Image (tube, rainbow, N blue to C red):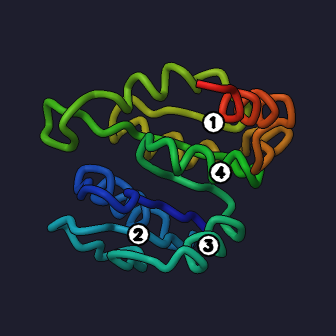
Amino acid sequence: MIFASVGSMLPFDRFVRAVDEWAAANPGVPVFLQIGDGTYRPRHAESARILTHQDYIARLAQCRLFVAHAGIGSIVQALEIGKQILMLPRLARLGEHTTDHQLHTIERFRDTPGLRVAGDTDALKAEMSTLLAAPLSGGAALPPYAPPEMIAKIRDYLRAPR
């Protein structure tokens, strides 16, 4: 199953339409889309506007491929469980976000094992097929907690006299 998510903040119809078009061309592959408040309603994939956190995590754990916007929450959740993720960043010039910070996010994570970025919707659809046929090696999962050294530094900072 492919699980695709636009996140919980803003609509992303360009993304939803592309994933739905891929689902139409690949009817044998189940696709579930979390679509948010966008205006485009998928016709070829199962969808919901919003999911409970529990349902979101269950779908993420069960999917063969996670496709998402380039939000840091989506990246971290995929990396925490070692799930391959394909991202399409939102673009400010298309009115999909107020800034292009998702482009900066993908630059920071571009070389992360298990993560792939599509530059446009055609590349997204092509990469979906590629990653189902030859999945990325996700590497070690990202730990869900900060390293003890970082926690100690924060603790020391907070305890320091001011």
Q: Position of residue 4 (x, y in %)?
A: 48, 61
Task: Answer with mark 4 or mark 2, whichever residue precedes in sequence.
Answer: 2
Residue for point 58% across, 55% down: 66
What amino acid is at disc 2? Gln
Is disc 3 in contact with disc 2, using a CB cutoff of under 8 Å?
Answer: yes
Q: Residues within 10 Å of mark 2 (few under 14, many from 20)?
A: many
Residue for point 24% across, 50% down: 14
- 80 displayed left or right of 115: right
What amino acid is at disc 1? Leu
**Residue carrying label 2:** 34
Q: Position of residue 89 (x, y in %)?
A: 37, 37
Is disc 1 in contact with disc 4, using a CB cutoff of under 8 Å?
Answer: yes
Task: Answer with mark 3 or mark 4, whichever residue precedes in sequence.
Answer: 3
**Residue carrying label 1:** 115
**Residue carrying label 4:** 78
Mark 3–mark 1 distance (CA, rounded to whole Å): 18 Å
Q: Residues within 10 Å of mark 1 (few under 14, many from 20)?
A: many
**Residue carrying label 3:** 59
- State the quadrant of the C terminus: top right
Q: Quadrant of residue 10?
A: bottom left
Is disc 3 in contact with disc 1, using a CB cutoff of under 8 Å?
Answer: no
- 72 displayed left or right of 13: right
At numbered mark 4, what does the secondary structure look like: helix, strand or loop?
helix
Residue nearest the viewer, comparing 146 with 3: 146
At numbered mark 3, what does the secondary structure look like: helix, strand or loop?
helix
Residue for point 40% across, 40% down: 88
- 125 displayed left or right of 135: left
